[in-house]
Image (spheres, grey):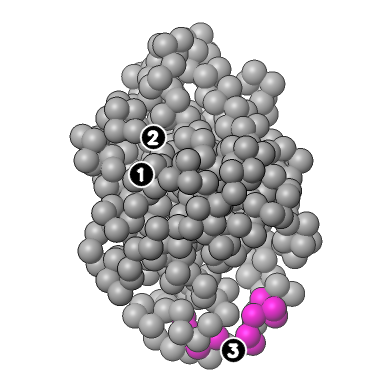
Amino acid sequence: MDTIQILMKFQELPATSDENVTVTDTAFNSVPVRIYVPKRKSESLRRGLFFIHGGGWCLGSNGFIFYIDAEVLQMAEATVDCLCEEQCALLCPCRHAFPAVGFSVSHSVFSISALLEYDLLARQIAERLDAVVLSTNYGLAPKYHFPRQFEDVYDALRWFLQEDILERYGVDPQRVGVSGDSAGGNLAAAVAQQIVQDPDVKTKLKVQALVYPALQALDMNLPSYQEGLYFPILSPLLMTRFWSEYFTTDRTLEKAMLLNQHVPMESSHLFQFVNWSSLLPERYKKGYFYKSPTPGSSELSKKYPGFLDVKACPLLANDNILSQLPRTYIITCQYDVLRDDGLMYAMRLQNAGVHVTHHHVENGFHGAFTLHGFKISYRLQNQYFSWLMENL
């Protein structure tokens, strides 16, 4: 993970207001948060959106810009023979990664501008939806491990949902939602499940909007993981590393996860919640055969029980919990190792009676939602804004 941090350039943007949005940094229950409030006068209480950034539980912040430039791209092949119409394969090291989504060109490695821009996204949400946006930080691995990330986010959300806090920021308690991308989508799903079980929280969420969320760490051999060796930005190896770092710096867990031999026999009943052979639509199962993972050592789960915890893996929630969840929006992308996590969660939520809008992006890939300046990002964000406008 240290190598990744060296290869990527990070920049923290200070809380800076503009002509449309007032931006302030504060802390909710000791958790750093950034609040975006539209400047235009509102005649009624506003929507409230609690947003959680991605970054594999290891990287990023709410004022985060992440750059990749030529030094990193030179680690891939200098000529990439696969590029979709949005130039989404510019990080793809394989000439066969996108056989069905676009034309072929050859191009040399070149620098690109900011990829992940959470500050800009929050401003756009606040302005477009006339919403108060609370964008939270949380403790990052490897300094902090699960459950610290979950606890930070949940503590900040509970603070935000207090009646006096909502009143202070002019938020309608009937119109509060939670959202996040990738690891942030994981945390959003986890805290949404916890909220419905918390009798002390009187204000409940109206919606959850999950952008290519990571939802399970039990089966690392889903079809999307098998296909994903050449997917751009997030590979199965990197995703497995993110998962293992979430729980520990002990590389023994990572090695067991890569072999899909980390879940002990006594926890094998949990596979019913992530069994892709019954939860994926037929088109995503074609050509793949389900094989029950080989049981792993009980010692790993005793030392690092987090990977069996529903707070880390929301797909492990039972149907009773799922049935209580709010209206849900899920984005999945075809060329994303996390694709099947989102597909299975959409199916389980629908089966539990939750109203789900599932937007699958055929030429999408992990990170596309926040790839500022690219047409695919513009399209995904517009659809996301439209759904929130209608449902929040």
Marks 3 and 2, the one that precedes in the sequence = 3
- Magenta includes 380? no
The answer to whether residue 325 is seen in the rendering is no
Circle 2 residue: 317
Q: Which residue is mark 3?
A: 79
Which of 35 and 5 lies nearest the eye of the viewer?
5
Look at the numbered disc 2 and give the secondary structure of its residue: loop
What residue is shown at x 67% (from left), y 66% (from top)? 68
Residues shaded magenta? 73-83
With respect to residue 8, does 218 lie above or below? above
Foreground tag (1 vs 3): 1
Q: Residue at x 54, y 30 (%)?
A: 134
Q: Which residue is mark 1?
A: 273
In the rendered image, the quadrant that contains the C terminus is: top left
Measuring 73% from the left and 48% from the top, which residue is drawn there? 249
Dot label at residue 315: none
Disc 1 to disc 3, C-alpha distance: 41 Å
Q: Are marks 1 and 2 in contact (CB under 8 Å)?
A: yes
**Quadrant in which the N terminus is drawn:** bottom right
